[in-house]
Image (cartoon, helix red, strand yellow):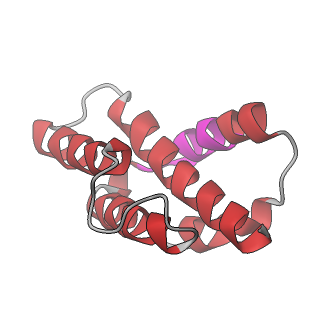
Amino acid sequence: MVRRLALSINVIYAALLLYYVLKKPNIPLKTKGIILGALGYFIVPTDAIPDLIPVVGYSDDLGALVLALAQVSMHVDDDVKSKARRKLTDWFGDFDGSELKDIDDKF
């Protein structure tokens, strides 16, 4: 259960990072396309590995989101990270922020 929750929070955090980058002014059209493609893949329930399969179901979503984040990483700044973490706190209350270290370390 803990591992599944940690993976879920990482997936949602990655999606939130992309969302807040998308909302920034002056983001190039190509960057917006990359973000929208990754977020679209995340929300579509019929992807490569169905999300109903515990733990594994979100791994392909996380992979797509992290790949998109790698391509738009120059736009992920402290403000974007702060907004994403605040939203996670709104939704999940207090959580162990170290769970997000894997994603933060990439940017």
Counting from the top left corner in percent of width and height, residue 28 is at 16, 38
| Placement of 47 over or under 18, stated as above or below | below
> What is the chief secondary structure element of the magenta stretch?
helix
Camera-nearest residue between 1 and 25? 1
Q: Quadrant of residue 3?
A: bottom right
Residue 107 visible in the displayed image: no
| Placement of 16 over or under 51, stated as above or below | above
Q: Residue at x 37, y 29 (%)?
A: 24
| Placement of 39 over or under 103, stated as above or below | above
Counting from the top left corner in percent of width and height, residue 86 is at 71, 36
Q: Residue at x 60, y 74 (%)?
A: 102
- Is 14 part of what is drawn in magenta? no
57 lies left or right of 97:
left
Direction right: furthest residue: 94
Residue 9 visible in the displayed image: yes
Magenta range is 76-85
Q: Quadrant of residue 88?
A: top right
Q: Residue at x 46, y 47 (%)?
A: 15
| Placement of 70 over or under 18, stated as above or below | below
Figure label count: 0
